[in-house]
Amino acid sequence: MNDSVLIEQFLEMMSAERGAAHNTILAYRRDLEDLANFVKTRQTTLKAAKTGDLESWLANLSMRGLGARTAARKLSALRRLYRFAHTEKILDANPALALSAPKLPRSLPKVLSTDQVEALLETAAADTRPAGLRSSALLHILYASGLRVSEMLALPIATGQRGERMLMVRGKGGRERLVPLSPAALDAIQAYLTVRDQFLPNGAIRSRAAGFLFPSRAKTGHLSRERFHAIIKTLAAKAGLDPAKVSPHVLRHAFASHLLAGGADLRAVQMLLGHADISTTQIYTHVLDERLIELVQNAHPLAKKD
């Protein structure tokens, strides 16, 4: 079995059995092809490579100036490939088991304060034109639910029309979860629905776009990530915020951080965000740390009082 066949079999498994997203598959392909090209320079193959060959590749990544986070992602692809090859009996042993991950600097997510989010929502709500009503609905849904941008933009036309307070969303890996819709988000959706038809495209794509809450001329039939990103940047500037610090993902972070600051359980936030592993949600533990410190200072009988 040559390297190309091994990579293709692995990617087919990731797509069919694990439900990996298209962009994830592309990233894995790039990383593994890079690894295959490297071990070829050492007169070996992916199947015959030893632990030392894989360690040399990781060292080579550092020599090329790639950061620890990029190297960690590439190492993850490598480990998954060799775990697959070992499980499928393509390899008798897994040479990746002894590899150690590069140390990652702790990176805290960028978060907007509640006042900043309010300023953003108020700026969107002040624009009563069709585009403003759409922007207001988008922001209210994102902040109320913590949806991934791709999940929100692909919401069906039926979203919020019967006044349901919860949405059933299919996220990464085909996993379904329930997420909330606030009364303010439901009101914003109802206001937007009065003008939604103005965003329906003409021509062949109209029938596909008709099924989405946020239709557009994009090939997908719904508003694109790029367009929504531009909308948020424009609103941030109008609200007096630094556009460089505001993005759709930052609003998702705000949703999680503000819930935790308000007393929500980390496991509940994990479920709402659709994280398969709670370790992903633990980037928000700094919020819990701050809340616990405040709790001890305010409630412990030996805490100093002013």
Image (cartoon, helix red, strand yellow):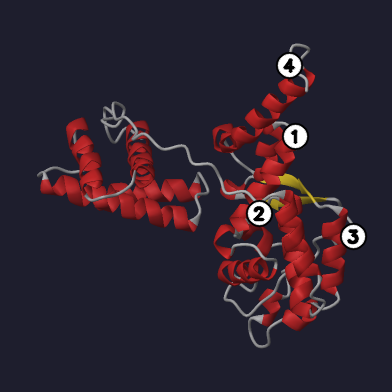
Say which residue appears at 64% left-offset and 81% top-offset: 205
Q: Nearer the viewer, mark 1 or mark 3?
A: 1
> Closer to the N terminus: mark 4 or mark 2?
2
Extreme residue in the front direction: 306
The amino acid type of the residue labelled 3 equals Arg
**CA gap, disc 4 and disc 2:** 35 Å
* Local SS, label 2: helix
**CA gap, disc 2 and disc 1:** 17 Å
The amino acid type of the residue labelled 4 equals Ala
**CA gap, disc 2 and disc 3:** 26 Å
Q: Nearer the viewer, mark 3 or mark 4?
A: 4
Extreme residue in the left direction: 43
**CA gap, disc 4 and disc 1:** 24 Å
**CA gap, disc 3 and disc 4:** 50 Å
Q: Is residue 239 visible?
A: yes
* Left or right: where 244 falls relative to 223: left
- Marks 3/4 in contact by CB < 8 Å: the verdict is no
- Marks 2/3 in contact by CB < 8 Å: the verdict is no
Viewer-side residue, 188 vs 34:
188
Viewer-side residue, 160 vs 121:
121
* Local SS, label 4: loop
Quarter of the figure with residue 278: top right
- The picture places residue 281, in percent across and down from the top left corner, at 59, 37
In the rendered image, which residue does mark 3 sit on?
162
The amino acid type of the residue labelled 2 equals Leu
Say which residue appears at 17% left-offset and 45% top-offset: 39
* Local SS, label 3: loop
- The picture places residue 216, in percent across and down from the top left corner, at 66, 77
In the rendered image, which residue does mark 2 sit on?
251
In the rendered image, which residue does mark 4 sit on?
303
